[in-house]
Image: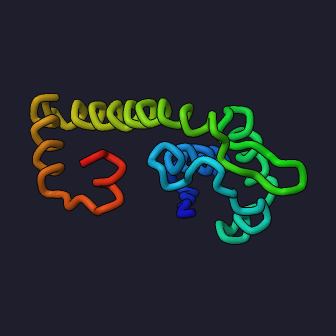
Amino acid sequence: MQIRISIEDGVPIYLQIVNQVKLLVASGRLAEGEEMPPIRVLAEKLLVNPNTVARAYRELEAAGIVAKRSTAGTYVSASGSALARRERFQILCTQADLLIREARQIDVSVDEVVALVRERDGAMPVDKTEEHELGR
């Protein structure tokens, strides 16, 4: 599981973990039924306090993305996959809002931004897992 933490972007670390796990589930990189790393293991890997990871897991559980199985660990829930699919658009909306805001600040029109996105999409190689996920 690839999670990257940034202490410079102003987003609380637990929320960065939550958002990235949601994105991993939404993209299919974390599948339904897949076990999440134990709290201490992920905390060591990310060099954060285990309480931070525990808080992220609680948030994910409350959102239905993951489910605890008594003493058997934490797993991506079946409802989490469907819920996370809806999260994709929320994540993209947030990113689009940021892009539009920045474009306005530097006096670039939305039409120019759309043209740039299309140009960049055409220039970006698509890996095989992405092709499979997108049904290409």
Q: In which image quadrant can residue 71 be found?
A: bottom right
Locate residue 21, reporting x and y percent: 58, 49
Q: Is residue 56 above or below residue 112?
A: below
Q: Is residue 101 above or below residue 29?
A: above
Please tell me which residue lies in front, 105 or 42.
Answer: 42
Residue visible at 76% across and 52% down?
74
Occupied quadrant, residue 129: bottom left
Residue 52 makes an appearance in the image = no
Q: Position of residue 35 (x, y in %)?
A: 69, 57
Visible residue check, residue 66:
yes
Q: Position of residue 80 (x, y in %)?
A: 61, 37
Q: Residue furthest right?
A: 71
Residue 3 falls left or right of residue 13:
left
Relative placement, left or right, of 52 versus 115 is right
Residue depicted at 57% across the width and 63% down the height: 1
Quadrant of res 126: bottom left
